Every structure is written in structure tokens, then in C-alpha cells.
Image (cartoon, helix red, strand yellow):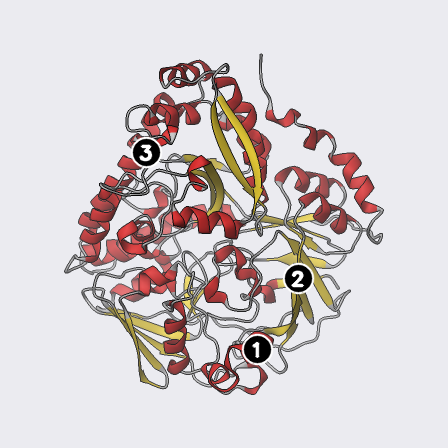
């Protein structure tokens, strides 16, 4: 008997649920507009041209290739525009600021406050105590040293106007913009604020993933407008981690003066940043809102809307109803509901390139020698039959079918979690050749593999899928629902357990019994593969994750121990880990896709964002109002 996941009751009830929910919110209308979708095509055309230019630059091959692969992290290869500036000046990375017109014309928006509804976050003003899915709370007002181009993901100057690095990749110096004011009269941004941001990142209460990157580093204010970071090992990802996204976005430049004079309580009440929006207020369980900062922004950003509200709404059906009735103006929705919103006159705002990926990770995969958290009784981690189960879990899934129905065809197959050909020679093309045999959809083969491991429909393997509703990640819940109908026929008894991202993250880091009962899905933004060397290493992070091995720890330590930038050696270390993960079925990879939200064209004209910021949707000054 064929099993089709789209036959679940949720899909069948969408129409009636929307109708019922719309009676609970105010009425509104929306008119359709043209959708701009040309960006990705422009990027694909530009990539070979940029590569050709870079090869004409007369610099040492290993330096050109190193930066090209470590700083590039998107399909459009953002660093191809930055690299020539980095390599031609020897050890100096100089990025020319992107001019922003200083224009303060007032736009006659239809509403003073634009409202964006998305999934739940861990609510706090202390950004260093939570992880990236919660960074929507900070991105409108908090800025980073390095920015991201809204269309290309190219790293551009922000609070740092330029940066340089030593030959061995261990010292990074950032030259800061002068005269940048903090909100609420807390003075001017200086290198001392950057040093304070560093100490928050590595502090005892930090939950930032950047803590493992900066843990053994020092930050020093050379003068008021120069800050230097010094690392004990090779640290090519420094601009990325200090940027707005692509693995960064967690090191925000906030007022040291405010912390010194007002303390944490004063900061919690009214955090001071430097963005074109400033903090206005929040209500626990409801949302957070910001107002346009008074006076011209230091970079000339001039948002159309006077206020922005981020509203936490757990269920995407409720978000859709609120969007259709005009209660909100922008919504994060699953692809299924995006189509429904489109039929009702709403329009999509999509990231410039497909830099989000979807995977499912398994608890209990702790294969490092002597790890006390390893439990051979976890079926998929068993040293003998675990690999059979992991392969069966992959082969039972019809990914083409899932792509068409989870993402409505708007994505591409990911052969190995986090790896993409644009990220450099650490990617192994052989994975694509071996995919069909090892991972390709085959129910009969999956059933046989499960039987060899001792499981069947009569004796199913229990598996808990931890289902959480996180900001701008509606695809995760839809994917978990779909897996039930793929896995049950081959002998896997799936239980969906509603949870919260904060709980899931805490549990997988703790490596306890809770997470060993199953796995969790996650939508993650593209990052450099040297970043993956670090975050996949328990030796680097000290936190549990998904798949852990001695090889991952060893290769990370080899990487940071390199005395020079040896691109060939780095690529080999990255590929060895990729091969190990691919051929041992470390997790369940799905797709690369674009982050997309829906908006009401009666209120919003357009929104341009790169999709890789720590808050995913970003660049709030480019949220344009319909006039």
C-alpha cells in the first residue's frame, strides 16, 4: 500500500481552519503585485566572471584559494568581490564601504507600525545567552563590525571600515568607523565597546556558538578606533564570525558605558545599540517592538516604517489567518500555506540565494573513543547494526516527493549536510555519484536493512521526533510530519513530541537520555566549511551535538595548528570529515532552499534580505512601505 504524507489531516483541514481563524481577527484586504525573482539568475551568471577576474590577480596561489573558500559561503560566492582587495595588499583585508545615500525623506506608509509574525524565540534582551534563532530580537537595533550585502551576501564594512590579518591567520585588526552614536545618549562607539562585546561572548553565561571560536582569543583596544583579536591557532573565519551572518551575527556591538553605569538591569530595560531602529519595548509571550532612531542614521539608513513589531505566533495557520485579515503585515509560513496566501493576494519576499538547508540530526551519535555518553543500546548508534538503521532511515524517504510538497519544488537536493560545491574543494563530487546506491529512495531495500537490524512493522523501532516551532523555520515541522508516513512502513514507530528549541538545544548539548530517544530537524544557514570543522568538533566546542568522532576532533586540531594558510591541506581535512559523515550516514540530509516570507502588498511594497543573517530575515531598512 502506498503511503503519501500529504494525506495527513492537517492539509485537508487548512481551508476550514483558515476560515474559522479569520473570524477571530480584524478584516482586511490585499491586492497582488509583481514578484521580483531575478536575483539568483544574476548571481549564477556573475560567478564565473568573478572567478576569472580573481585568477588574473598575481598573488600566491594558496592565499587566493584560502580566502576564496573560507570567506565565500554562498552560491553567488560573495568573497569573489572581496578577495581581490584582500590579496593584492599582501596581508591586508581592505573592504571598500558600499555608499549609502544619505536621504531622510519621509515615506507616507499606510501604517506607522509594520507587524511581522513568526515562530517562538527564547525571549531576552541578553543576546549572548541565547542562540541564533532568537536573534530577531536584536538585529533591528544591534550592529556588528562586518555587514552583509542584502543582495549578494558579500561581506561589507559596517562598524568596521576595514580589516587586516597576519600571514599566519592568527592576528586580525579592525579599523572602526568614527563618530557612531549609541542610542539613548550613551556616547560614541569605540574599540572599548568591541572588547566588552568579546568578553560577553566568552563569559560564563554565554550560550553563543561564537564562544568556542573566541574562547582562547584575546581582544585588545589598540586605540579608540582600532581593535585587534589574537588567536593561538589559525582563525580564517574571524570576519565571518564578526559579521551580520554566515555563521556570525552573535557578537553585537552594544554600549559598554550603559553596562558600566546602569548595570544589567538598566540594559534589560532599554538596550542601546547603533542601528537605524532602536529598542522600544516588549511583552513576554507576545512580542517585541522597535522605533525608528531619531535623527539621521550614521550610515544613512532611512527605514520607511516608524515602528517594527515582531510578534510571536506559534502556529503557522494562525499567522496565515492574521495576515489575511490585516492584523499583521508579514508572516513566516510553511510552503503549503505560502501558496494559500498567494491565492489570497499576498506576495513573497525571498532571500537572494538558496542558502538555508534542512537536515534531521540523531541523538546518541557519540563515537569518540571512550565517550561516557555513548550508549550502544541506542538502536541507530549500535556499533554493529546502527549503520544499517541509519541507511534505512535515509533510503525510506522519497526526497523528490518531499521537495515537491514540503518546499513546493523550490529547493535542491543536499547530498551531504552543510556541504555545497560553491564552498570549495572540500566538497567531494563522488558523493553525487554514490548517492542513488547509498541514499536513493528504495522502500524494499530500507525494509531489508531494518530487518537485518532486527526491526519490522510487527516489531518496530521506537523513534521520537522533537517537534518545535522556531522563528522562520516552518519547514521543520512539516518535514517531521512527513517522515511518519515514510518510516512506519519499514519498521520505525515515530512519536512526534512538541518541544521548544531552547529545550532541544540544551538536551543535545548535554548528551543525556532525553535526546538519545530520537532526533530533531533544523533549518540552518550556509557557512564556511572551516566553521564546520570547529562546530562539529567536541574538542573545540565542549558541547554535544549530532555526530561526534575522533576524526572530527583530530582534523580540527590539525587545522588550527597549521603555521601557514595551506589551502590544499585544509581542503583535505574538510573532505575527510565529509567522507566520514557521508559514508557512515551521520544524519539525514534534505535540501538547500531560499528563506521566503509572505507580505501584504497593501502595506509592504518589498523586502530585500540575504537570508544568512543571524536573524535570517534582516536589513529592516529595506522593508519598504507601499505608498
Which quarter of the rendered picture does the C terminus lie within? bottom right
The x and y percentages for residue 50 are 36, 53
Q: Tell me residue 492's x, y (percent).
A: 48, 23
Side of 368 relative to 140 (left or right)? left
The alpha-carbon separation of the residues under discs 2 and 1 comes to 31 Å
Residue at the image point whose x is 49% and y is 45% from the top = 523
The vertical placement of 470 against 7, above or below, is below
Left/right placement of residue 609 relative to residue 339 reads left
Q: Would you identify the image quadrant in which residue 177 lies? A: bottom left
| Residue located beneath label 1 in the image | 102
Where does the image place residue 33, in percent across and percent down from the top left? 72, 50
Residue marked by disc 3: 582
Mark 1: which secondary structure? Answer: loop
Which residue is labeled 2 in the image?
287
- Badge 2 crowding class, 10 Å Cα cut-off, few under 14, some 14 to 19, many 20 or more, is many
Nearer to us in this view, 323 or 56: 323
Can residue 409 be seen in this snapshot? no
* 169 on left or right of 142: left
- Of label 3 and label 2, which has the lower sequence position? 2
Where does residue 272 sit, x and y in percent of width and height? Answer: 54, 78
- Mark 1 or mark 3: whose residue is earlier in sequence: 1
* Residue 102 against residue 529 in the figure, above or below: below
Q: Is residue 464 visible?
A: yes
In the rendered image, the residue lying farthest to the left is 563
Name which residue lies at 50% across and 34% down.
464
Q: Which SS class for mark 3?
A: helix
Dot in front, 1 or 3: 3
Query: Which-is-in-front pick, marks 3 and 2?
Result: 2
Amino acid at each position: 500500500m502506498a503511503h503519501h504524507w500529504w494525506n495527513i489531516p492537517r492539509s485537508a483541514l487548512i481551508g476550514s481552519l483558515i476560515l474559522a481563524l479569520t473570524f477571530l481577527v480584524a478584516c482586511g484586504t490585499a491586492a497582488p503585485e509583481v514578484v521580483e525573482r531575478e536575483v539568483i539568475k544574476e548571481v549564477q551568471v556573475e560567478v564565473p566572471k568573478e572567478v576569472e577576474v580573481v585568477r588574473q590577480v598575481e598573488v600566491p596561489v594558496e592565499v587566493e584559494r584560502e580566502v576564496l573558500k573560507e570567506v565565500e559561503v554562498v552560491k553567488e560566492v560573495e568573497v569573489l568581490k572581496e578577495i581581490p582587495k584582500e590579496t593584492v595588499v599582501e596581508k591586508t583585508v581592505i573592504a571598500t564601504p558600499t555608499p549609502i545615500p544619505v536621504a531622510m525623506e519621509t515615506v507616507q506608509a499606510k501604517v506607522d507600525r509594520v507587524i511581522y509574525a513568526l515562530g517562538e524565540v527564547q525571549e531576552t534582551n541578553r543576546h549572548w545567552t541565547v542562540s541564533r534563532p532568537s536573534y530577531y530580537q536584536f538585529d533591528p537595533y544591534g550592529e556588528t563590525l562586518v555587514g552583509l550585502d542584502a543582495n549578494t551576501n558579500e561581506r561589507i564594512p559596517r562598524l568596521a571600515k576595514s580589516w587586516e590579518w597576519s600571514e599566519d591567520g592568527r592576528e586580525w585588526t579592525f579599523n572602526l568607523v568614527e563618530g557612531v552614536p549609541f542610542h539613548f545618549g550613551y556616547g560614541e562607539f569605540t574599540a572599548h565597546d568591541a572588547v566588552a562585546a568579546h568578553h560577553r561572548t566568552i563569559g560564563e553565561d554565554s550560550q553563543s556558538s561564537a564562544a568556542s571560536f573566541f574562547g582562547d582569543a584575546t581582544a585588545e583596544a589598540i586605540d579608540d578606533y582600532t581593535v585587534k583579536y589574537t588567536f593561538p591557532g589559525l582563525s580564517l573565519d574571524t570576519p565571518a564570525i564578526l559579521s551580520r551572518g554566515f555563521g556570525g551575527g552573535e557578537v553585537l556591538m552594544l554600549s559598554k558605558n550603559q553596562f558600566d553605569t546602569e548595570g544589567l538591569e538598566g540594559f534589560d530595560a532599554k538596550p542601546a545599540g547603533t542601528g537605524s531602529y532602536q529598542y522600544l519595548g516588549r511583552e513576554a509571550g507576545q512580542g517585541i517592538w522597535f522605533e525608528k532612531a531619531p535623527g539621521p542614521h550614521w550610515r544613512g539608513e532611512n527605514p520607511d516604517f516608524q515602528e517594527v513589531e515582531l510578534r510571536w505566533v506559534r502556529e503557522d495557520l494562525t499567522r496565515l489567518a492574521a495576515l489575511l485579515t490585516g492584523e499583521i503585515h508579514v508572516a513566516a509560513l510553511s510552503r503549503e500555506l505560502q501558496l494559500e496566501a498567494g491565492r489570497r493576494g499576498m506576495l513573497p519576499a525571498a532571500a537572494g540565494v538558496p542558502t538555508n538547508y534542512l537536515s534531521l540530526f540523531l541523538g546518541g551519535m557519540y563515537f569518540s573513543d571512550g565517550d561516557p555518553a555513548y550508549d550502544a543500546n541506542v538502536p541507530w548508534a549500535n556499533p554493529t547494526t546502527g549503520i544499517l538503521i541509519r541507511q534505512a532511515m535515509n533510503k525510506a524517504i522519497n526526497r523528490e516527493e518531499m521537495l515537491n510538497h514540503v518546499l513546493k519544488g523550490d529547493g535542491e537536493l543536499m547530498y551531504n549536510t552543510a556541504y555545497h560545491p560553491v564552498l570549495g574543494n572540500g566538497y567531494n563530487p563522488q558523493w553525487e555519484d554514490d548517492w542513488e546506491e547509498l541514499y536513493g529512495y528504495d522502500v524494499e531495500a530500507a525494509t531489508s536493512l531494518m530487518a537485518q537490524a532486527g526491526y519490522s512493522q510487527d516489531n518496530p523501532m521506537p523513534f521520537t521526533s522533537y517537534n518545535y516551532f522556531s522563528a522562520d523555520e516552518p519547514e521543520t515541522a512539516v518535514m517531521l510530519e512527513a517522515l511518519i508516513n515514510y518510516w512506519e512502513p519499514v519498521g520505525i514507530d515515530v512519536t512526534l513530541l512538541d518541544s521548544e528549541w531552547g529545550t532541544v538545544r540544551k538536551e543535545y548539548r548535554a548528551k543525556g537520555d532525553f535526546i538519545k530517544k530520537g532526533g530533531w530537524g533544523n533549518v540552518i544557514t550556509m557557512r564556511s566549511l572551516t566553521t564546520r570543522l570547529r562546530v562539529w568538533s567536541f574538542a573545540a566546542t565542549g558541547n554535544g551535538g549530532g555526530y561526534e568522532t575522533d576524526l572530527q576532533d583530530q582534523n580540527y586540531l590539525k587545522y588550527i595548528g597549521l603555521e601557514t594558510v595551506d589551502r590544499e591541506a585544509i581542503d583535505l581535512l574538510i573532505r575527510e570529515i565529509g567522507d566520514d559523515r557521508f559514508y557512515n550516514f551521520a544524519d539525514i540530509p534534505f535540501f538547500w532552499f531560499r528563506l521566503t516570507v509572505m507580505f501584504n502588498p497593501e502595506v509592504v511594497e518589498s523586502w530585500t534580505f540575504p537570508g544568512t543573517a543571524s536573524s535570517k530575515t534582516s536589513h529592516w531598512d529595506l522593508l519598504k512601505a507601499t505608498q
